[in-house]
Image: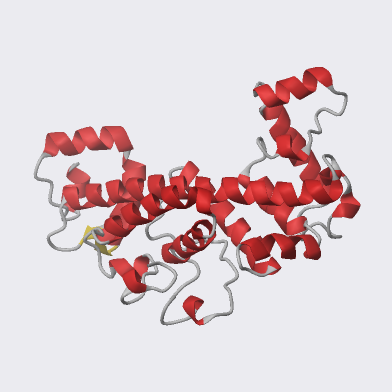
Amino acid sequence: MSLLESRSLIVKDRATAEEFLGYANYYRFSGYCLAFQDKPDHFRSGTEFDHIVYAYQFDSDLRSLVGDWLELAEIDLRTQAVHLFSLRYGPFGHCIASNFTNPFSKKMTHADWLTRLQKDTNDSSKERCVEHFRNRYSQYPDLPLWAAAEVMTFGCLSRFIGGMNRKDRKQLAQHYQLNSDELASMAHHLSYVRNVCAHHGRLRERLNQIKPLLPNSHEWKPPLLTDNGRLFCTLLFLRLLTRRTPHVLEGANRCHAKINALLKRPPNVPNPSTRMGLPNNWENHPLWI
């Protein structure tokens, strides 16, 4: 604590601050300190320990809400993809490389993807649907696609969508009023954000490494969207995906309302809106309202 105070951080309640650091650990806490510093290892004048705690809690609340919204979008996306693919190619059509593009992706062959899916299946071997199939059928560790969909990770799902033949992906994308490349890119981006949330990464001011391909319409261009690597772009995609699916709309609207309220109370850092990719008058963005 003395180290933080020597760097001009105001600590009003030392015991409570030490208790918080005992919970969050110093290294994790220090990542949230960066936005409050005017130079390395020095806090801006007037910065209090509680300001950083609020930023920490803001990010925690944000991750939770985005995670809930991602769950709704992911379940719908995998359901739509699996239904389309199974009707066209049968229950084990995903095991056949010729039902996908060639090459499957820039970094992964179809065989690599299938091996990854089999690993996901083995990791979930205690799940009732997996155990039922393993005990009764010889195809294990391959599962019918509708069962495999219950155990594949979001990353595995995004690779599946990216590997689809263009005609299949185009049909799936039409459900969300996107084109096939936009859908594949968006799925890859959302799987990355899902992992950030799952591993408790900082989300509010993150510049995402995997940026989505944006639709070619004015809603996705400056000044309405300033950066496709920031939080607001992710939120717009979640809004777009779930507002077109009636059975998840109620839950998605709750997430939207809570995030909307949270974004109005940002941490006390310079340019908080810019750090989240929020444009001017972001509340009235045509895709957000």
In the rendered structure, the answer to whether residue 15 lies left or right of residue 243 reads left
Q: Position of residue 34 (x, y in %)?
A: 31, 58
Which residue is at 20% across, 35% downward? 18
The image quadrant that residue 186 belongs to is: bottom right
Whether residue 70 can be seen here: no
Whether residue 109 can be seen here: yes
Up-down relation of residue 43 to residue 114 (above or below): below
Up-down relation of residue 174 to residue 16 (above or below): below
Q: Position of residue 138 (x, y in %)?
A: 88, 24
Q: Tell me the quadrant of the picture where the N terminus can be found.
A: top left
Q: Nearer the viewer, residue 5 or 139?
A: 139
In the rendered structure, the answer to whether residue 71 lies left or right of residue 202 reads right
Up-down relation of residue 215 to residue 130 (above or below): below
Q: Nearer the viewer, residue 271 or 148?
A: 148
Which residue is at 66% across, 28% downward? 124
Q: Tell me the quadrant of the picture where the C terminus can be found.
A: bottom left
Which residue is at 77% across, 24% downward? 133
Which residue is at 60% across, 70% downward? 213
The residue most toward the front is 246
Up-down relation of residue 133 to residue 66 (above or below): above
Q: Nearer the viewer, residue 78 or 83?
A: 83
Q: Position of residue 136 (x, y in %)?
A: 82, 19
